[in-house]
Amino acid sequence: MGHYIPQDKFFKQAKNEGFRARSVFKLESIQERFHILEPGDKVLDLGAYPGSFLQYIAKVIGEKGIVIGIDLRKIEPLGRKNVKTYEGDINNPDLIKKIAAENDIIRFDVVTSDLAPATSGIKDLDAGRSFLLNEQALAIALRHLKPGGHFVFKAFPGIEHQKLLHTAKNHFKVIKAIKPPAVRKTSREQYVICLKKL
Ligand SMILES: C[S@@+](CC[C@H](N)C(=O)[O-])C[C@H]1O[C@@H](n2cnc3c(N)ncnc32)[C@H](O)[C@@H]1O
């Protein structure tokens, strides 16, 4: 999460609406365009701290749904019954299996990933780290999504990123890369929307 960023209109809007981060508006615009989330859905959110995606997802899925957030950092409780949070590393192979079992979940309807590595400022190094996280996130989505489920992840374009898109194309019916309006003009960040797991 950038600490030295100017407080732009999305920052202010997030604050006014009680969201923990401005990232929420990226997910909101994805939802408005692709309708990935539905009431009652079981959702896994990777890299969930501080929790603005979780706040938004919880609202859309309602009381009958459940969203599980995982992050290396501890997420302050959201005070909602349909949200559960775990502190952990998504690279730990048993973590998601354990969490799913603990919550009686066989397959998720949607996996969202806003995972971002600690950045070094060195473009290629950061893109490389982001790729490794996304490779892992994609593996999790393929293992834990139901057929017909959706996966959304944040990415930075690069050679390795193309490899990831290629893999995703083999496993989802539709793949779209977009830059939501809440992504800063100066950022290369994109979100890849993978619809309908095969
Ligand atoms: C941009 S922030 C997420 C913001 C969040 N979507 C929100 O709306 O509040 C990215 C997060 O990814 C987490 N992260 C990075 N590597 C991780 C890993 N290996 N396992 C779990 N979380 C990780 C970071 O700790 C960071 O909190």
Image: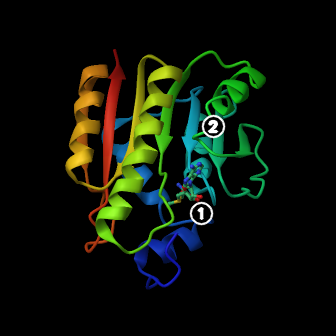
The colour scheme of the drawn protein is rainbow
Of 164 and 101, the residue lying toward us: 164
Q: Is residue 187 visible?
A: yes
Return the x and y of residue 97 as percentages of the image width and height. Answer: 66, 24
Q: Residue at x 43, y 50 (%)?
A: 27
Residue 110 vertical position relative to residue 184 in the rendered view, above or below: above
The image's mark for residue 19 is: 1
Q: Does residue 99 appear to the left or right of 57 in the view shown?
A: right
Task: Report the residue marked by disc 2.
Answer: 92
* Front of the two marks 2 and 1: 2
Return the x and y of residue 130 as percentages of the image width and height. Answer: 40, 53
| Residues packed near mark 2 inside 10 Å, few (<14), some (14 to 19) or many (20 plus) | few
Q: Is residue 182 visible?
A: no
Return the x and y of residue 141 as percentages of the image width and height. Answer: 47, 29
Q: CA distance from mark 2 to mark 1?
A: 29 Å
- Quadrant, the C terminus: top left
Give the secondary structure at mark 1. Answer: loop
Q: Is mark 2 within 8 Å of ligand 1?
A: no
Q: Residue at x 53, y 22 (%)?
A: 144
Q: Is mark 1 within 8 Å of ligand 1?
A: yes
Label 1 sits on what residue type?
Phe
Label 2 sits on what residue type?
Asn
Q: Residue at x 26, y 74 (%)?
A: 186
Badge 2 or badge 1: first in the primary sequence: 1
Q: Say which quarter of the image contains residue 98.
A: top right
Return the x and y of residue 16 as percentages of the image width and height. Answer: 57, 72
| Residues packed near mark 1 inside 10 Å, few (<14), some (14 to 19) or many (20 plus) | many
Give the secondary structure at mark 2. Answer: loop
Of 51 and 98, the residue lying toward us: 98
Residue 115 vertical position relative to residue 170 in the rendered view, above or below: below
